[in-house]
Amino acid sequence: MEISAIEIHLLCDKVSKSIDDYFVSGIYSMEDGALFRVNHSTKSERLIAVSSFATWITTKNLSIAQATSFVSHLRVLERFALISVEQIGNERIAKFSFESKKGEKRNLFAEFFSRGNLILTDSSSGDKIIDVQNPQSFRHRILKAGEKYILPPSRGVPLQDIDFQKLSSIFNASAKEDVEDLSAIRWFGRNIGTSRKFVQEIFFRAKLNPDLVAKSLSVEDLEHISMACENLRVELQRSEKGYILLPTEESDLEIDVCPIVPNSWNQQVERHLATIIQFPTLSEALDEVLMQAIILERRRSVSQRTRARAAELSSAITKQAAQIEVNSNRADELRIMARNLITSQLEKSDSDPKIIRKLVSYDILELSKTAGNQPKFLTEPRSFLKSYSGTALGSRLFDEAKRLDSETRKIKEIMTGLEMQKETLDETTRSHEEKAERRLITERRERQWFERYRWFLTSDKRLGLGGRDSTSNSVIVNKYTSYEDVVFHADLHGSPFFILKNQKSEKSPPDEIALEMAQATVSFSRAWKDELGSGDAFWVYPDQVKKSAPSGEYLPRGSFFIEGKKNFIRHVKVELSVGIMSSANFPIIEKSSDSSNRDQSTTDSVSLLVVCGPEKSIAKYCESWIRIAPGKEKGSMFARRLKQQLVNKIKDQKEKEVSKKLPLDDFLRVLPSGSYKIVLERQKN
């Protein structure tokens, strides 16, 4: 794949514009790279793919299950703010700048050439290397922990800097060098840092013969080249689409990606060597390329042994088929020779050297070293050719032809058995590969705005929204609370604020809804981690929640002062239920104050969401659910068991297949902090 420096520049620019005020919330391994999940307090989350050939905002789940050791080390960047993403010079290198709340600064350099590389540095110490994905040593630099990160030697003048004046200066400077036999296109490629496809495209747009000798370029030619460079830059910057060049099976071309369709691609299509596929964005085209690479790797890994065995069987079948053809041809020739010998009625058959050479080549005769090189039959060591008359030899050759026919029948039986084995093996291989591909979860559902927080639907179809930490507590109260809502809080330290949306004209929430909200508030509080059996909660109106404490008192971050009467709900059980909800059952949520930034609450296609809340509300919207309580089982192992049991209880086959592809992270994310146990499993009748 040939991603050029100018394409890297465009991709970095798009990523940088998408991550203002975002912080890193997760880092995962992906094929030859890393996947960054970044979040914002009010905007939807982003996934940034950093592969061996480019970086982009992805909409796919490209992560692999097992994190590499390097990605594990990269996780020190979690909770760091992602400040910027920029291309370095004219290199195919992206620089990711991070900063922690304590002011620690880190840089991640992603090199998109050769096999690709990722280098984590400490920017406060002059970019001293902390860790590197692929340690390497070069003449000009060393990529190892403890060394200073140094850029590779420059690859020429950036395409985006080329104008007539700059190009003329380069041409005049190179005229002093020995460029007698250098073509114009090679001269341009040596001096301008861009990919071969764009060099060819520039000469095509300039309407210049690429084989023109460089020294014969005129001022007018240089003007045409500089104008072609400008036109190409403008088209690349304005393009919103992405294209893939997909080689045919007979072609030895490589897959390629581009924001435009170069003329060289059209030529390959005209030669029937490739096809061009269009995507709405360049990022989606890059997603597809990486997905295909992952799928290919998965298919290869699960079928490596069976494919090797199938190759052995194919080789054996080919050899057997060749032997059948040889035996058939020899048997036919032996019969012809036999008829001729019987017809001629020779007294001595050994007088014809042609017959002897032929029968020796057919492994019927051999020359006896102990009997003066006299020909004798291989199957009868004491039977010499000289003792046979023409008629007897003809009869013997008919017998040899029958023997070859018999061998051929046995070989055909063996070959039939091998073909059956190969067919079975091929079917097994296809089955394993298709199963591996189905297990590959690449589609990623776009998260709805409220999924950044604790949430559930009450049994009367209202949204309960809660904070995850002090920051989101502040966002919930300051941004999402309106005069129509009711605010809930547990009467203990470490409690989230929960908001019951759309209380509207009702003076107070119904008792059963208040109990649901109270149970969620208490269960998602410190009470779960401390393994309490129950706790108290209260609700107030939004105008009772004050952002500042009374004079002389201090409020920590994420805390608020409650003024006036608190409406308590006592002895609320610390217990929740987890279920899988279909978006078809999801009611439309009325617009909040974040309507400009949030995702749509409903989508055209039905998808599945993992939800955790009080059992009464979960049971209303989910086909199956599991009641959980504080216990001894830890997060990931419990989430895996939880997912398996929930999926098994789904009756609808289509929904069951979709639920199998839900990421384990979706189940982990909805659970309260602490450890767990299963209390009861339920499903609708």
Image (spheres, helix red, strand yellow):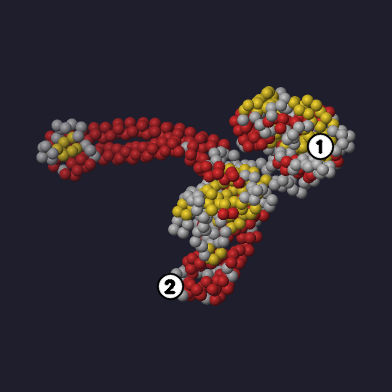
Tell me: 588 left or right of 415.
right
Residue pictured at 55% horizontal, 50% vertical: 120
The residue wearing badge 1 is 487
Q: Residue at x 68, y 43 (%)?
A: 446
List the residue tagged with mark 2.
178
Q: Quadrant of residue 478?
A: top right
> Residue 495: where, in percent of width, then height?
74, 35
* Category of crowding for the residue at label 1, using alpha-carbon neighbours closer than 10 angstroms: few (below 14), some (14–19), many (at least 20): many
Is residue 252 visible in the rendered structure shown here?
no
Measured along the vertical axis of the image, is residue 350 above or below residue 129?
above
Could you say which is closer to the camera, residue 488 or residue 361? 488
Alpha-carbon span between mark 1 and mark 2: 80 Å
Camera-nearest residue between 581 and 21: 21
Secondary structure type for disc 1: strand
Task: Report crowding for label 2: few under 14, some 14 to 19, many 20 or more residues within 10 A (C-alpha).
Answer: few
Rendering coords of residue 620 (x, y %):
75, 29
Decide: is 147 above or below 303. below
The residue that appears at 34% across and 37% down in the rendered structure is 320
Q: Earlier in the sequence, mark 1 or mark 2?
A: 2
Please name whichever residue, 613 or 296, is drawn nearer the observer in this view of the structure.
Answer: 613
Observer able to see residue 508: yes
Type of residue at label 1? Val
Which quadrant of the figure contains the C terminus? top right
What is the number of the mark on residue 114?
none
Side of 393 where 541 appears, left or right = right
Q: Is residue 500 left or right of residue 423?
A: right
What percent of the width, then of the height, locates residue 426? Answer: 46, 36
**Amino acid type, residue under disc 2 in the picture:** Asp
Is 398 or 146 nearer to us in this picture?
146
Q: Nearer the viewer, mark 1 or mark 2?
A: 1
